[in-house]
Image: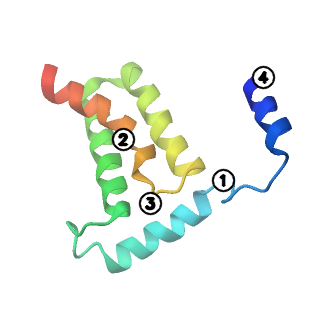
Amino acid sequence: MIPYYLVRFWKGKKPLYCNRFQIDENGRYLQNWFQKDFKKLFIRNDMTHSVIISALTLLVCCHIGFPKCIPWLLIMLSGWILAKAQETRVFTICLVPITYFILYI
């Protein structure tokens, strides 16, 4: 918490480069993705990567079991709410349970 206040003190209260909650914007991106790029599913598109990672995470969490998958589902949900869905670096942490499932089960 202290580093946050130090950065605010040093840099000042400049506006953020994007909104704090991205859920509305992500909904619009997802709607446009379904209308335009869903037919070309394997097109190189960041939204496609986010959707594929999210779908795989949901499928793997069903096989891992309910108590073990809660942190990964919360991470994925927070990614869709707080980050831009077109920034796939947010969703790459969700590859951990997928990798675990593939390697150890």
The mark nearer the N terminus, 4 or 1, is 4
How far is the residue under mark 3 from the one under mark 2? Answer: 12 Å
- Horizontal side, residue 6 vs residue 86: left or right: right
Rendered residue at 40%/44% (across/down) = 91
The amino acid type, in three-letter code, at marker 4 is Ile
The mark nearer the N terminus, 1 or 3, is 1
Residue bearing mark 2: 92
Name the quadrant of the N terminus. top right
- In the rendered structure, are the residues bearing label 4 and label 2 in contact, judged by CB atoms less than 8 Å apart? no
Nearer mark to the viewer, of 4 and 1:
4
The mark nearer the N terminus, 2 or 1, is 1
Give the numbered dot on residue 86.
3
Image height of 97 relative to 50, above or below = above
Give the numbered dot on residue 94.
none
How far is the residue under mark 4 from the one under mark 1? Answer: 23 Å
- In the rendered structure, are the residues bearing label 1 and label 3 in contact, judged by CB atoms less than 8 Å apart? no
Kind of element beneath mark 2: helix
Nearer mark to the viewer, of 1 and 3:
3
Rendered residue at 31%/62% (across/down) = 48
The amino acid type, in three-letter code, at marker 1 is Phe
Residue bearing mark 1: 21
Nearer to us in this view, 38 or 18 = 18
How far is the residue under mark 4 from the one under mark 2? Answer: 28 Å
Residue bearing mark 4: 2
The mark nearer the N terminus, 3 or 4, is 4
Name the quadrant of the C terminus. top left
Q: Percent from the top left, x then y, of residue 53?
A: 31, 47
Nearer mark to the viewer, of 3 and 4:
4
The amino acid type, in three-letter code, at marker 3 is Gln
Q: In which quarter of the image is residue 19?
A: bottom right
- In the rendered structure, are the residues bearing label 4 and label 1 in contact, judged by CB atoms less than 8 Å apart? no
